[in-house]
Image: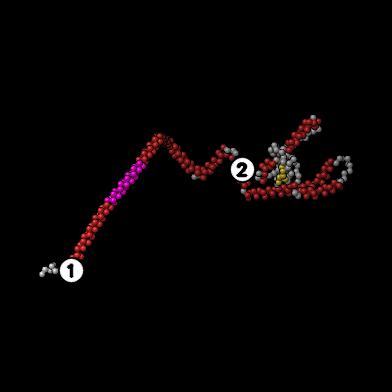
Amino acid sequence: VPVHNIYNPFWQTKVTVSQSDILIMGLLNFVFTSVGELLHRGLLSGHGFLRQAWEGCGIVFSLLLYFINTIINLLLIGTQNLYSVLVSAVEALSCPLQKALELTLTVLTFLYSSLVGTSILLWTPCRLAMEFLGSVCHVFVSVFLLNSYGLFLTLLIITSATVYLNPALPRHVCLHVINYINTVPIIRCLRRALHRLFVLERNLWQRLAWYHSQIMVPARMEVAERDVRPPDHNPEPQADPNAAGEVAENAPEDAHQVDDPIDLPLPSSSTRRPLRKFPSEDSCKGPPADNLLNLLQEQEERKKCVICQDSTKTVVLLPCRHLCLCRNCTNILLSQPIYQHNCPLCRHMILQTMDVYL
């Protein structure tokens, strides 16, 4: 009995389910195939888009590179042109300088060669002269300097020749030596001490002379009276006791004054001038105008400084109290060494000065 003829509902249901599955699978296959085609087409279109975008980017990059290359070429061409312009300008400016430098070098070379030739030409006689002088000096040193007698003779000859050619040289040397000695403090102190001793000794001798004169005055007066006494045996004049008393009273005062002889007033007469003759009675009988003019001239002359004879006397020298110098001459005199600070009239030492205005 055939089986397929047997009616089986379960089998029919199974066959129906399998057909629906086949339909679904076919539908799904169709869907998947459609989706794959769509995806494939999308991928192909995206790849084309990307390729086109890449090609566009390449074109843009190529254009950018071309633009940059163009700019670089322009800069290089401009730099080359500028460099060529600068080189041409430098060549145009340096051509005269180069010619001047070449000319200068040529002149210097010529001068150098000329100087070298001249020096070589002149050096030979100079070298011979120097060799001759060297030999002469060697002989002179060996004969005169290395020998004591020769050295003494040489110094003597040099000194004699120097003194003969410069007669004023010894005086200048002595003055320099004296000035140097005067600048030494010890020598100056010693000179001041000696000057003070000299002043003390002179004062002592003046005191002794004054005492001797005071003692010898009465004896001399008696001798003079005896010599002058007439031979008619008239009675001798009696000595005036008042006069003796005055002498005795004045003696202590004079002795007190002599104790300090520096303060004694001395006559203000110049020792370097001749004595001025006073006009006599006969000469005074002339016209009064001439006498007055002479007196005025003498008075003006007496007002002049005793050294310069130009300025007026304005300085009193102390302690001698002589009005005989102007301020300029006083400054010059006081700038000298201390042993020369003496009054030009009495030669007393100047200890102080005082300005007066007449």
In the image, residue 194 lies at what x, y percent? 67, 49
Q: Distance between the Cα atoms at labels 2 and 1?
A: 175 Å
Tag shown at residue 9: 1
Task: Residue 65: say if magenta.
Answer: yes
In the image, residue 283 lies at what x, y percent? 79, 31
Point out the stretch of residues depicted in magenta: 48-75
**35 horizontally vs 103: left or right:** left
In this view, the residue in front, 137 or 16, is 16
Which quadrant: the C terminus? top right
**What residue appears at the point 84 percent right and 43 percent down from the top-left corner?**
225
Above or below residue 219? Residue 101 is above
In this view, the residue in front, 58 or 268, is 58
Q: Quadrant of residue 155?
A: top right
**What residue appears at the point 11 percent right and 68 percent down from the top-left corner?**
2
For label 2, the SS is helix
User: How many marks can you see?
Assistant: 2
Which quadrant: the N terminus? bottom left
Mark 1, residues whose alpha carbon is within 10 Å: few (<14), some, or many (≥20)? Answer: few
Q: Which one is in front in this view, the residue at disc 2 or the one at disc 1?
A: 1
**148 horizontally vs 218: left or right:** left
Tag shown at residue 147: none
For label 1, the SS is helix
**35 horizontally vs 273: left or right:** left
Tag shown at residue 175: 2
In the image, residue 97 lies at what x, y percent? 41, 36
In this view, the residue in front, 15 or 291, is 15
**What residue appears at the point 78 percent right and 50 percent down from the top-left corner?**
256
In the image, residue 237 lies at what x, y percent? 87, 44
Above or below residue 103? Residue 49 is below
In the orientation shown, which residue stands out farthest toward the left?
1
**What residue appears at the point 69 percent right and 49 percent down from the top-left corner?**
196
